[in-house]
Image (spheres, grey):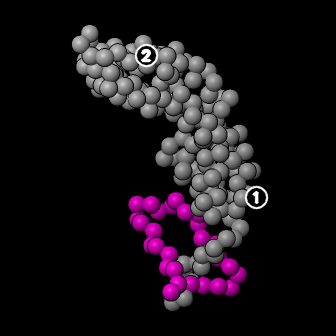
Amino acid sequence: MALQRKPQRPDRAGLACPPVVEDGQEAAGSSGRSPVVTESGPSSPDQVRSKAIALLARREHSRMELHRKLLRAGCDGEVIAPVLDALESEKLLSDQRFAESVARVRGARYGSRRVADDLRRTGVGTEATALVHRLQASDEERARELWTRKFGATPADAAARAKQMRFLLARGFPTDVIYRVVPRPARGGEDV
């Protein structure tokens, strides 16, 4: 049983690298308009560039993230690096701009540790140091706001406090901030 390629969804058009036509080949039963797609063939710099710009038009990407996506799309690895260099020199690709975008969007919901891990995972480390320090400065305020929205009341006992602390820990807030934000249970409940 041969595996068949899934047809591309119309709303996802333009995401894949344009097909590469091998010399003298045409798609079976076609009028010569649709080229034969090779599994792994060389991609021209123009094709890689148009694919990269299509990805960047949707949202900011880090250089490493964009490189991985282009490789997964079947673009030639040797062509990707010079194209990404050109995009950086034209200011279309910027790790700093990507880091600012991630810090702005995720900083509203997550703590500085989580944002720093997300940036590190996408290949942005040193560019984001100042952004992470700014987030660390406001960790307690953001954690308190999140805790108030989610729970808003002093925990009844140690188990409820532990649950609230785990919630903030999973959101990437530092433990010292969590201990300051989550109040101890009322006198009737056991202390942690």
Q: Residue at x 52, y 31 (%)?
A: 115
Relative to 148, say whether 37 is above or below. below
Q: Residue at x 76, y 58 (%)?
A: 78
Confirm whether residue 154 shows in the render. Answer: no
Relative to 72, say whether 60 is above or below. above
Nearer-the-camera pick, 111 or 63: 111
Q: Amino acid at mark 2?
A: Tyr
Nearer-the-camera pick, 190 or 78: 190
Residue labelled with disc 1 = 78
Q: Which secondary structure lies at badge 1?
A: helix
Q: CA distance from mark 2 to mark 1?
A: 50 Å
Pinpoint residue 106: horizontal percent, then vertical percent. Answer: 46, 32
Quarter assignment of residue 91: top right
Q: Classify mark 1: residues with Cα within 10 Å, few (<14), some (14-19) or many (20+).
A: few
Please give the label number shown on residue 179. 2
Nearer-the-camera pick, 26 or 122: 122
Q: Which secondary structure lies at badge 2?
A: helix
SS majority, magenta: loop
Q: Residue at x 63, y 73 (%)?
A: 39
Confirm whether residue 136 shows in the render. Answer: yes
Q: Classify mark 2: residues with Cα within 10 Å, few (<14), some (14-19) or many (20+).
A: few
Which tag is nearer the camera, tag 2 or tag 1? 2
Of callouts 2 and 1, the N-terminal one: 1
- Rendered-image quadrant of the C terminus: top left
Quarter assignment of residue 42: bottom right
**What span is colored magenta in the figure?**
1-27
